[in-house]
């Protein structure tokens, strides 16, 4: 087969070498595909249009559609800027198309810079505002950016240190609710699913580098349209992880789906890395089922007879033995020994005045106990075995599992006495003391996305609409299971939308005094309907009228600001109270700090020459924990902030080292030098507790690796 293809390609090459090369590339791609698992078109790497970015020589650009035109420019090619000249009417760019076959001139204001995902970027951050009510707490960060590039920026600031990610990506409904490479994807797009997978895979690969491999969790919400594909993609991207899917009821009224079943829930994938596992946490009563295994504040007794897999006598003959019961007093006389598999249980004679209780299953067949004879005797002595209603040889026997016994040992439950059968009687927990890991079916009133998503959002930003925001309490609950014991966790969300994840993290801090911080990423795109309307009015991306209606500026930033200040964008106190866990007036706000940024694209030559520090400075601040005020400008010697310092002049290394030594909370030292030996000499002067980073070599290397590209 391979020889036949090569022979055919050789024949094609004699006629058209370019076509033969393209065919070889496509065949090579197909040959690398998995025989089993998830296969999909990788598609050309995405691009993003950087409106507002200054056009420079060497940039890739496209022509902008004329004002008032709703569609794209008739010439959709990508060009390379060769030179820029000044004319009487403004600046002109001389362009060459990427194939080198055509060239033209165009005014700079008719061009937009293109960032190709195959090319390295050199990001910076420009502050666009802040809210500070949290005193010395670390800052939450909101970044207006294309999320792939923001994730690349975070490789410099947070690689391997993120505790949790909560993502609510596009659900790929076909309703033009997301873009692939600047174009909306609709229901008529035959590659809709493979584009979505390519889009997600690129971002998940970068997210994996950010997550702490020893203990972190990735949570992704999705509905049935991409649920199966996402599950396979997660298994392929995180092969070492433990993955569970939970069904979450989000709309008791259900959403009509034409001739289909009405949709009332969605799904959360939990991708658990390293030691990450859900923690038992206090839960409200509506989490607790009324049937099966319940938790109402009492210690839980489990049936001693095994009822799950491998529950037959023949599976574990050593766990088939009699428990001799005095039926009059409902007390256990003694525990017998296991009998051979070929011995009839009826041949066992119980002591006088007792009956033999066996692990007989509901269908009448012989089962087995969960413990062996010696372990059962030990549990009986300790009061960890309990007798149910007497039913002859089928009398149910209960016991406390090792986990429940540990709760007594840890003081969660106190033994207050013994029952008539010798089993321990323990205290009962109040509702706020009950700690539970729930099932995979979440039917909780507080997760209603209409009541506690859309309508709650209207309290914070009245008269502004955002489609399908998550219930604040659903996100809060999902994170709590993994962050209850991590008061300093870093949480990311690069599909931030209305900012629910940041709001949930701040609520968790309010509940336990934590210093968790979130990093939210969202672009400033407008909806498809708004885009058409704005273009008809002659507006373009980058215009104030356009940007004012973008997701980040119109929804995300004002929602997070309102949550902290307790005031709506018009300055009115927010009406109502938070409910369920930790109720208090929303107008009280939250004692948190947040900084808002826009991602910038820097020239690496300027960065390397130490001429772009202002743009790089926020990344240094974030890497050092985002606490206190950042160092925003260079000096002739060095500068220190709350948690980090920057040495600008090697000659000041001694004074810098002394200052760092006296700064007890300083965690990171950035040393500006292009000489590795000088860097090592300075690093040797600093305390071992301080991380040392070489600028700008470390910064440039991070992005020149081109991580995550195909």
Image (tube, rainbow, N blue to C red):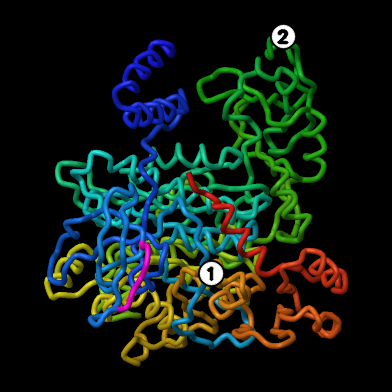
- Picture disc at residue 343: 2
Pick the front one: 49 or 333: 49
Pick the front one: 308 or 110: 110
Residue 618 appears anywhere in the view: yes
Identify whether 531 is placed above or below 205.
Answer: below
Q: Position of residue 275 (x, y in %)?
A: 67, 49
Near mark 2 (Cα within 10 A), the count class, few <14, some 14-19 or many ≥20, is few
Q: Residue at x 65, y 15 (%)?
A: 314
Q: Position of residue 453 (x, y in %)?
A: 34, 67
Q: Is residue 548 left or right of residue 484?
A: left
Q: Position of residue 15 (x, y in %)?
A: 29, 23
Q: How many marks?
A: 2
Identify whether 424 is placed above or below 574.
Answer: above
Q: Residue at x 84, y 85 (%)?
A: 655
Identify the residue under disc 1.
518
- Residue 551 falls within the magenta-colored stretch: no
**What secondary structure characterizes most of the magenta part?**
strand
Q: Position of residue 50 (x, y in %)?
A: 36, 67
Q: For the residue labelled by badge 1, is the local secondary structure a helix, a strand or a loop?
A: strand
Pick the front one: 483 or 80: 80
Near mark 1 (Cα within 10 A), the count class, few <14, some 14-19 or many ≥20, is many
Residue 645 appears anywhere in the view: no
Q: For the residue labelled by badge 2, is the local secondary structure a helix, a strand or a loop?
A: loop
Can you tell which quarter of the image residue 481 is in?
Answer: bottom right
Pick the front one: 412 or 562: 562
Q: Which residues are magenta?
A: 81-86
Q: Is residue 653 left or right of residue 190?
A: right
Q: Say which label, 1 or 2, has the lower sequence index.
A: 2
């Amino acid at each position: 087969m391979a020889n036949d293809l090569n022979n055919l390609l050789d024949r094609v090459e004699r006629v058209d070498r370019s076509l033969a090369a393209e065919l070889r590339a496509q065949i090579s791609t197909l040959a690398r595909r998995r025989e089993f698992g998830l296969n999909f078109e990788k598609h050309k790497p995405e691009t993003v249009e950087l409106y507002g970015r200054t056009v420079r020589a060497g940039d890739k650009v496209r022509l902008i559609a004329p004002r008032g035109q709703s569609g794209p420019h008739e010439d959709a090619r990508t060009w390379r800027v060769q030179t820029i000249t000044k004319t009487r009417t403004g600046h002109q760019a001389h362009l060459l198309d990427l194939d080198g076959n055509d060239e033209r001139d165009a005014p700079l204001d008719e061009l937009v810079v293109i960032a190709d995902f195959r090319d390295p970027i050199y990001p910076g951050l420009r502050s666009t505002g802040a809210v500070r009510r949290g005193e010395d707490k670390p800052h939450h960060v909101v970044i207006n950016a294309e999320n792939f590039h923001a994730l690349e920026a975070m490789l410099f600031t947070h690689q391997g240190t993120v505790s949790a990610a909560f993502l609510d990506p596009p659900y790929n409904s076909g309703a033009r609710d997301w873009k692939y490479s600047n174009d909306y994807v609709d229901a008529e797009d035959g590659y809709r699913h493979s584009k979505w997978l390519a889009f997600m895979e690129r971002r998940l690969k970068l997210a994996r580098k950010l997550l702490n491999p020893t203990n972190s969790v990735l949570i992704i919400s999705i509905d049935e349209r991409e649920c199966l594909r996402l599950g396979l993609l997660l298994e392929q991207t995180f092969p070492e992880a433990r993955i569970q899917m939970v069904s979450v009821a989000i709309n008791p009224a259900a959403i009509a789906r034409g001739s289909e079943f009405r949709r009332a829930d969605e799904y959360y994938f939990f991708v658990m890395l390293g030691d990450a596992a859900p923690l038992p946490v206090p839960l409200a009563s509506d989490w607790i089922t009324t049937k099966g295994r319940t938790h109402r504040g009492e210690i839980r007794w489990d049936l001693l007879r095994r009822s799950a897999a491998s529950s037959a006598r023949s599976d574990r003959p050593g766990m088939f033995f009699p428990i001799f019961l005095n039926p009059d007093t409902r007390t256990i006389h003694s525990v017998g020994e296991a009998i051979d598999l070929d011995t009839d249980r009826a041949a066992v004679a119980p002591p006088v005045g007792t009956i033999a209780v066996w692990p007989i299953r509901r269908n009448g067949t012989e089962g087995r106990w969960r413990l062996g004879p010696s372990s059962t005797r030990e549990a009986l002595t300790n009061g960890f075995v309990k007798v149910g209603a007497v039913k002859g040889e089928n009398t149910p026997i209960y016991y406390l599992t090792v986990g429940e016994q540990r709760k007594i040992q840890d003081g969660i439950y106190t033994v207050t006495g013994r029952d008539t059968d010798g089993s321990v009687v323990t205290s009962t927990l109040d509702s706020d003391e009950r700690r539970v890991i729930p099932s995979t079916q979440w039917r909780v009133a507080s997760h209603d996305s209409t009541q506690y998503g859309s309508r709650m959002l209207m309290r914070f930003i009245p008269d502004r609409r955002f489609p399908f925001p998550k219930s604040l309490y659903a996100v809060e609950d999902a994170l709590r299971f993994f962050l209850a014991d991590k008061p300093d966790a870093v949480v990311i969300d690069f599909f931030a939308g209305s900012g629910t994840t940041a709001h949930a993290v701040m609520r968790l801090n309010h509940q336990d005094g934590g210093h968790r911080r979130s990093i939210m990423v969202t672009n400033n795109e407008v909806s498809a309907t708004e885009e058409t309307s704005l273009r008809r009015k002659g507006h373009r991306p980058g215009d104030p009228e356009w940007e004012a209606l973008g997701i980040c500026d119109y929804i995300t930033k004002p929602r997070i600001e309102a949550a902290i200040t307790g005031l709506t964008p018009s300055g009115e106190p927010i009406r109502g109270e938070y409910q369920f866990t930790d109720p208090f007036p929303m107008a009280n706000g939250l004692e948190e700090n947040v900084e808002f940024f826009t991602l910038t694209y820097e020239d690496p030559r300027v960065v390397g020459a130490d001429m772009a520090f202002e743009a790089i400075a926020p990344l240094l601040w974030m890497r050092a924990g985002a606490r206190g005020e950042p160092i925003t400008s260079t000096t002739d010697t060095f500068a220190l902030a709350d948690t980090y310092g920057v040495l600008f002049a090697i000659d000041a290394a001694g004074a810098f080292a002394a200052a760092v030594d006296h700064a007890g909370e300083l965690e990171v030292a950035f040393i500006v030098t292009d000489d590795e030996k000088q860097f090592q000499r300075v690093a040797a002067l600093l305390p071992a507790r301080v991380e040392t980073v070489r600028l700008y070599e470390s910064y440039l290397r991070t992005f020149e690796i081109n991580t995550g590209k195909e």
